[in-house]
Image: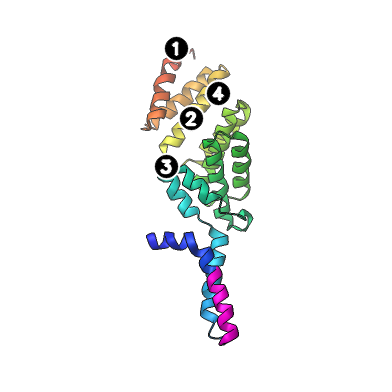
Amino acid sequence: MKALNLFIRYRLPLGIILLLGGIALGISVGWWEATIVLLLAVICLVTHFMFGPMRLVQEAVEAGDIDRAMAMMNTIKFPKLLYKPIQSVYYFMQSNLAMYNKDLDKAEATIRQSIKSGSPMKEYEGMQYFQLGTIAYQKNDLKEADANLKKAVRMGLPDKENTAAALLTLASIAMSRRDFKTAKDYFRRAKAQKPTTAQIVSQIKEMDKYISRMPG
């Protein structure tokens, strides 16, 4: 695992060194003898531009090291060259990091680019629309938030925590519209997910105080 991470981190300079070495070997000894070196150089360079350091970015995010994740993301100079599913993940991570920095405009622009790039898996596609809906909600664009969160729930989200969060936001939107019956339905579905994340559990307890007093 560590060897793979080292390869991902240094494959661009390694590819350049191998390319220069292969060319020198081809000129001085022969191109047949340089074939393997040149092939290794191509593998290093192509995989660098097609896949980038997204594995390392994901590991940094999971470790809570946002600064390292952002530094890794900044090494990707040509995102359009990334393999399409990887490109989608790249823009999704860009959106996450922009939200962390409270840059909602950039977060929205990059999640839209992620959606445009396609999705590597069905659950991930749901997360794209969940992200877009969450951004719209934070911008107080309730119509856009409602549409995208409904789409995210319909497509399916990867775990009960995200599903509960989407349903709670939909309940909150319904409450703001005084659609109490719909709000209660979304709230019931959110509770049925049995989330364990402290923030979501706290939101459920807080919303429960208002839901129980609502008519309908």
Q: Which label sits in the foreground, 3 or 1?
A: 3
Q: Which label sits in the foreground, 4 or 3?
A: 3
Placement of 146 over or under 29, stated as above or below = above
User: Label 2 is placed on what type of residue?
Assistant: Leu
Q: Are marks 4 and 2 in contact (CB under 8 Å)?
A: no
Q: CA distance from mark 2 to mark 1?
A: 19 Å
Answer with mark 3 or mark 1, whichever residue precedes in sequence: 3
Q: Secondary structure at mark 3?
A: loop
Q: Front-most of 21 and 103?
A: 21
Q: CA distance from mark 4 to mark 3?
A: 31 Å
- The reply to whether the magenta stretch includes residue 18 is yes
Q: Front-most of 30 and 90?
A: 30
Answer with mark 1 or mark 4, whichever residue precedes in sequence: 4
Which numbered tag is attached to residue 64? 3
Q: Secondary structure at mark 2?
A: helix
Question: In which quarter of the view is residue 62 placed?
Answer: top left
Which numbered tag is attached to residue 167? 2
Bounds of the magenta segment: 16-29
Answer with mark 2 or mark 3, whichever residue precedes in sequence: 3
Q: CA distance from mark 1 to mark 4?
A: 17 Å
User: Label 4 is placed on what type of residue?
Assistant: Ile
For label 1, the residue is 213
Q: Secondary structure at mark 1?
A: loop
Using residue 78 as the reference point, say whether residue 67 is left or right of it: left
x, y percent for residue 5: 43, 59
Placement of 114 over or under 197, stated as above or below = below
- Please identify the dominant SS of the magenta region: helix
For label 4, the residue is 173
x, y percent for residue 116: 63, 47
So how many labels did they put on this image? Answer: 4
User: Label 1 is placed on what type of residue?
Assistant: Arg
Neighbor class of circle 4 (other Cα within 10 Å; few <14, some 14-19, many 20+) is many
